[in-house]
Image: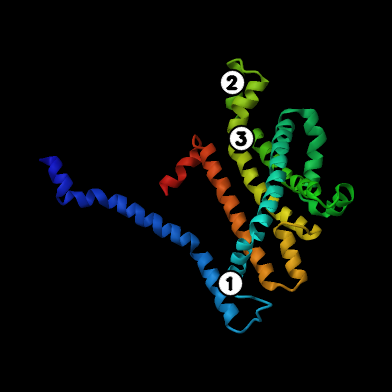
Amino acid sequence: MAGIGIAGGPLAGLAREPSASRWLRSAAWGFARVFSIFALALAWELAARSGAFTPYMLPALSAVLERIWHDLIAGDLLLNTGVTLYRALSGFVIGALAGIALGMGISRNRLINWFFDPIISVGFPMPKIAFLPIVILWLGVYDLSKITMIAVEAIFPVVTATVVGIRGVERELLWSARNMGAGERELLWQIAVPAALPQVITGLQVALPIALIVAVVTEMFMGGYGLGGAMNTASRFADSRGVFAGIVEIAVIGYALVKGMTLIRRRLLLWHQEAVAPSTV
């Protein structure tokens, strides 16, 4: 009788209320997160159609989206996006692997720390893109030079995050592991690296947008295929819609990459205390 009362009686509404409340709260929060984007898009469209700007200075968002659709149908968008992502992700992977390896070496080896720490300290705040003309002289204007610049830019935040993460491991964990007979290799791979993983992933999250930015900048500087090259070509021919279309495309791709890294972080850090934070909000 009690079971029938809960299933069909007034208590059924109370049982469903928390689920419905959570769904409404989740939907409202999702809308609030994208509201600013819709507001910006609406302001762009209204400003372009107000007559305060010429179509050359500020084309309407609808016209820009129409241009993006035309490029998608023609195949240019997929080609340029694929080329840019290939360069950005290739340079990012190279910089990430080299940065993690170098960061581990700096944090665990005095000789490596003595040699590379001044280089990292001096090179991190420098605009590495200033070396682009030299890289062009050495490697040409093709993919090798672009991927090299991307890797050089991406390596610095990864190195810094890895060093900070490994050096920030609690001493008690290391002492306990040593007392249980762990060697230096076990300390590094079983204690230090897992404990430093949140910091390392943070460095990767910083490096990935940088890789996309540098890929676009090098393409704009050197020309050729890619989103940056397409924007440069559109600018030369006074194609305002093409330039703004490139901006929108890069923004969408960058947003997708950042969200992808966030999902990867959640997957890799299911064991970490930050994994339970979203459920408590």
Secondary structure type for disc 1? helix
Q: In the image, what residue occupies the spot 18% across and 49% down?
A: 11
Residue 205, relative to residue 233: is it above or below? Answer: above
Q: CB of mark 2 within 8 Å of CB of mark 3? A: no
- Considering depth in this image, is 272 or 178 the residue closer to the camera? 272
Q: How far is disc 2 from disc 1 in space, using C-alphas?
A: 59 Å
Other-residue count near label 2 (Cα within 10 Å), few / some / many at <14 / 14–19 / ≥20: some
Height in image: 257 above or below 60?
A: above
* Type of amino acid at the residue the image marks with label 1: Leu
Horizontal relation, residue 175 to residue 149: left or right: left
Which residue is drawn at the image coordinates 58% and 83% (left, top)?
50
Residue 157 appears in the figure:
no
* Label 2 vs label 3, nearer the camera: 3
The numbered mark, 2 or 1, whose residue comes first in the sequence reads 1
Q: Position of residue 122 (x, y in %)?
A: 81, 46
State the residue in front, 243 or 268: 243
Percent x, y for residue 230? Answer: 72, 62
Q: Residue furthest bottom?
A: 51
Residues at marks 2 and 3, CA–CA distance in whole angstroms? 16 Å
- Closer to the N terminus: mark 3 or mark 1? 1
Name the residue beneath numbered marker 2: 177
Disc 3: which residue? 196
Residue positioned most to the left: 1
Residue drawn 45% across the image and 47% down it: 278
- Which quadrant of the figure has residue 151? top right
